[in-house]
Image: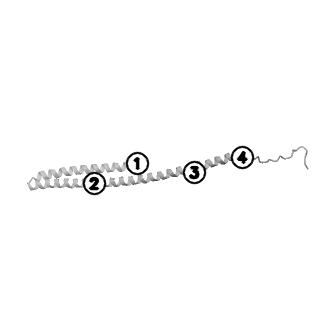
Amino acid sequence: MKSKGTPAPVQNRPQQLPPELIKDLVANQTRDLELRAQELDLQRQQDNHSFAFSQNALKAQLEDRNEQRKYEKSLLKIRVFLVIALFLIIASVILFCLWKDKDTVAMEIIKALVYICSGGLGGYGIRAMESRKTKTEKDS
C-alpha cells in the first residue's frame, strides 16, 4: 500500500553530455598521452646521456689511476736509486777513511749515521702512530 504523503521516487536519468564536450575530453586525453610520450622520450634521452657520461667518467678515472700508478712507480724508482747512491757514497767515504788509516774519522761518520738514522726512524714511527690514530678517529 502506498501512502498518500510520500511522493513517487524520481528516476535519475543519466544526462547526456554534449558532443562538443566529449570531443574536447578526448582531445585533452590525446594531448596528455602525447605529452607523456614526449616526457618518456626525454627521460630515455636523459638516461642515455647519463649513461654515456658515466662511461666516459669511468674511462677517464681509469686512465687517471693508471697514470697515477705510473707516476708513483717512477717516484719509488727514483727514491730507491737515491738511497742506493747515498749508501754507496757513504760506504766509499768510510772505506776511503779506513784505507788512509783515519779510523777515528770513520767511527765519527758511523756514529753520526747511527744518530741520524735512529732519529729518522723515531720520527717516522711517531708519524705512523699519529696517522693511525687519526685514521681510527675518522672511521669511528
Badge 1 is on which residue?
A: 138
Name the residue rendered at 28%, 48% in the picture.
Answer: 123
3 and 1 marks in contact (CB < 8 Å): no
The amino acid marked with disc number 3 is: Ala
Between marks 2 and 3, how big is the CA–CA gap?
55 Å
Name the residue rendered at 58%, 49% in the picture.
Answer: 36
Give the crowd class for mark 3: few <14, some 14-19, many >=20 residues within 10 Å. few
Residue 72 marker: none
Residue 19 marker: 4
Q: Nearer the viewer, mark 3 or mark 4?
A: 4
x, y percent for residue 68? 33, 53
* SS for callout 4: helix
Q: Nearer the viewer, mark 1 or mark 2?
A: 2
x, y percent for residue 100? 8, 54
- Residue in front for this viewpoint, 80 or 35: 35
Badge 3 is on which residue?
A: 37
Q: Of callouts 2 and 4, which one flags the residue occurring earlier in the amino acid sequence?
A: 4
Name the residue rendered at 27%, 54% in the picture.
Answer: 74
The amino acid marked with disc number 1 is: Lys
Badge 2 is on which residue?
A: 74
